[in-house]
Image (cartoon, coloured by chain):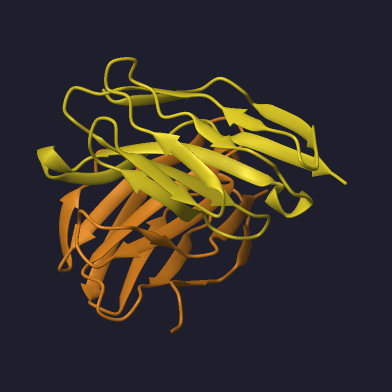
Amino acid sequence: GDSVTQTEGQVALSEEDFLTIHCNYSASGYPTLFWYVQYPGEGPQLLFRASRDKEKGSSRGFEATYDKGTTSFHLRKASVQESDSAVYYCALSDFGGSNAKLTFGKGTKLSVKS
Amino acid sequence: NAGVIQTPRHKVTGKGQEATLWCEPISGHSAVFWYRQTIVQGLEFLTYFRNQAPIDDSGMPKERFSAQMPNQSHSTLKIQSTQPQDSAVYLCASSVGGAREQYFGPGTRLTVL
């Protein structure tokens, strides 16, 4: 079945550091890829999505580019802030197969200190 | 606009008791999803309704778990004879259509003693 792998379980940074969270996927079809962010006591909320090869998604300074060749969708931010501390999830959905469910990675907990 | 509403926010049950979790999707959304979140397994899909009809329940445990959507304004997830391993945060999400952005509720934290 479809799967998503996030390499980093936890990332600790200082403000203004560069962030990279790695995401690789495996899917039988041509999935849509997502990044979600979750704050304590809340449900995940969508950061952005990308549906086609080489498409870049972005929001709030975060960005990721859909790379079908390497089956990756790595999250990057040039300068993190303390308010970015949260858990980040990479996810996919195979809409082409009429299956709208989300398959999530294990999540990456980002801690940013001032 | 009110987001997805889930009640209760916290529920504690004894082993063997029944638990019913409620979800009110965003008005006008036709798709409702249920997910389970644990430290060990992360976020797992359970089941999905579109226009109140069950579409995919491939993530539902075959025993003790059931979900319904009797009308467009709410869905329920029922767990019979709860076990400690059922302890988790149960998340409900809704979307305008099946292939659109899913909006998540805050979740119900179920603790089975």
Quadrant of residue A18 within the rendered picture:
top right
Q: Is residue A114 above or below residue A71?
A: below
Colour yellow, chain: A
Q: Nearer the viewer, residue B4 or A63?
A: A63
Q: Is residue A30 above or below residue B98?
A: above
Residue at 56% across / 49% down in the picture? A61
- Do we see residue B16 in this rendering? no
Q: Is residue B54 above or below residue A75?
A: below
From the top left corner, tell me how far across and down residue A20 is, in percent: 60, 29
Where is the N terminus of chain A found, in terms of image quarters?
A: top left
Q: Nearer the viewer, residue B32 or A107?
A: A107
Quadrant of residue B103 within the rendered picture:
bottom left
From the top left corner, tell me how far across and down residue B109 is, in percent: 60, 57
Q: Nearer the viewer, residue B58 or A38?
A: A38
Q: Residue furthest right?
A: A114
Residue at 56% across / 35% down in the picture? A76
Q: Residue furthest bottom?
A: B1
Colour orange, chain: B
Q: Is residue A17 left or right of residue A89?
A: right
Q: Is residue A18 left or right of residue B20?
A: right
Residue at 48% across / 41% down in the picture? A63
Q: Nearer the viewer, residue A70 or B71?
A: A70
Q: Is residue A50 left or right of residue B112?
A: left
